[in-house]
Image (tube, rainbow, N blue to C red):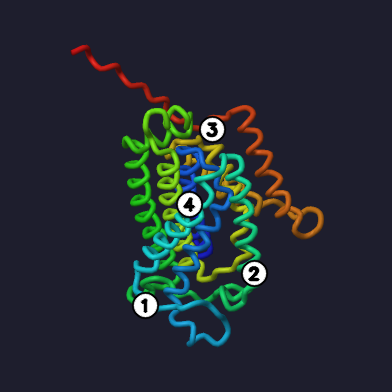
Amino acid sequence: MSIAWQFYISSILVYLGVDVMACWGLNLQFGVTGIMNFAYIVFQAAGAYTAAILTLGPSSRSLFQHYIGGANLPFPIPIIAAGAVGALLSLVVGTFTLRRLRVDYQAMVMLIVSLIAINVATNQVDLVNGSAGLSLVPKPLSQVLNLDLVNYQWFYVALTAVVCVIVFLFVHQVTRSPLGRTLRAIRDNEHSAAALGKNVTRFRLLAFVLGGAIAGVSGAILVEFIGTWAPGSWTYAETFVLFTAIIVGGTGNNLGVAVGALLVPVVFLEATRFLPPIGYPGLIDALQWVAVGLLALLFLWRWPRGVIPERRRRFRKPAPG
């Protein structure tokens, strides 16, 4: 296999791992608990920004980009910190939005939060270097391993796979536990769950925070791979791609969500790169979003449970004592 193909395939595998992790976090919020988080990409971007500044070093040393604080922490501390920041930001946002608003109003507020975050990040140069973003983020363990570019690419694929396995084990443990059954009960009928003594707001906030932590980790893995961070790459439209992946794969099903992450962000969108150029420059990129919307509508209409539907759980009645 040529070096170019190795570089391309390894990059796609890393992006796939990032998308799978992001979809698992969003599925925990939306598919399992029923939270319409249209600002999910904000928490992923916050985790990515945290990992970037904790790897770049103190901001006083940089002459061409501005950011808050900064450190040069060893791997994997920036990734762990990214998950913590994603969880903390989710706690702050969720405390104000999940407690007092209906689900449909929550979705509107989350979309507004996403729009505000993008505009603030784009216009505040001293905060995140404005629209230029951050660059030259050092790759983790690159100096220790001393690998050439292609071999390091494959090392990062393995690293991403390890993080994916850890995230999957965590999400699987949550969804198959009594906590997961409580979250599904809240999703299906919050009033019945409240009548059984469950604190609906607290459990929703817990799922929101856990999903935000996973979003932060996935963003950190991505930014330390590509080495750059810019607010223009974390728009609300990216959240809808993740929603479409969950709908296509199977809402509430961890395996189905992984399949959806493979089919939509990777296969469906990446395949357009091989189309011959048509129309004016940028037309195919614009049509991508139209195609994603049509794909989501098609599955919602014809196959609302996705490719791998959530398994219906049946519990046996206890034997008479």
- 2 or 3: mark nearer the eye: 2
Q: Within 10 Å of the Cα at label 1, are there few (<14), some (14-19), or many (20+) other Cα atoms?
A: few
Q: Earlier in the sequence, mark 4 or mark 3?
A: 4
The residue carrying mark 3 is 306
In three-dimensional space, the C-alpha distance between marks 1 and 4, rounded to whole angstroms, equals: 42 Å
Q: Which of marks 2 and 3 is nearer the N terminus?
A: 2
The residue under label 4 is which amino acid type?
Thr
In the structure shown, which secondary structural element does the residue marked by tag 2 occupy?
helix
Q: Which of marks 1 and 3 is nearer the N terminus?
A: 1
- 4 or 3: mark nearer the eye: 4
In the structure shown, which secondary structural element does the residue marked by tag 4 occupy?
helix
The residue carrying mark 2 is 122
In the structure shown, which secondary structural element does the residue marked by tag 1 occupy?
helix
Q: Within 10 Å of the Cα at label 2, are there few (<14), some (14-19), or many (20+) other Cα atoms?
A: some
Which quarter of the rendering shows the C terminus? top left
Write the residue at 37% across / 55% down. 163
Left or right: where does residue 108 sit relative to residue 221? Answer: right
In three-dimensional space, the C-alpha distance between marks 2 and 3, rounded to whole angstroms, equals: 36 Å
- 1 or 3: mark nearer the eye: 3
The residue under label 1 is which amino acid type?
Gln
Q: Residue 95 carries which label?
A: 4
Left or right: where does residue 47 sit relative to residue 169? Answer: right
In three-dimensional space, the C-alpha distance between marks 1 and 2, rounded to whole angstroms, equals: 32 Å
In the structure shown, which secondary structural element does the residue marked by tag 3 occupy?
loop
In the picture shown, does residue 302 fall above or below 271? above
In three-dimensional space, the C-alpha distance between marks 1 and 3, rounded to whole angstroms, equals: 44 Å
Q: Residue 143 carries which label?
A: 1
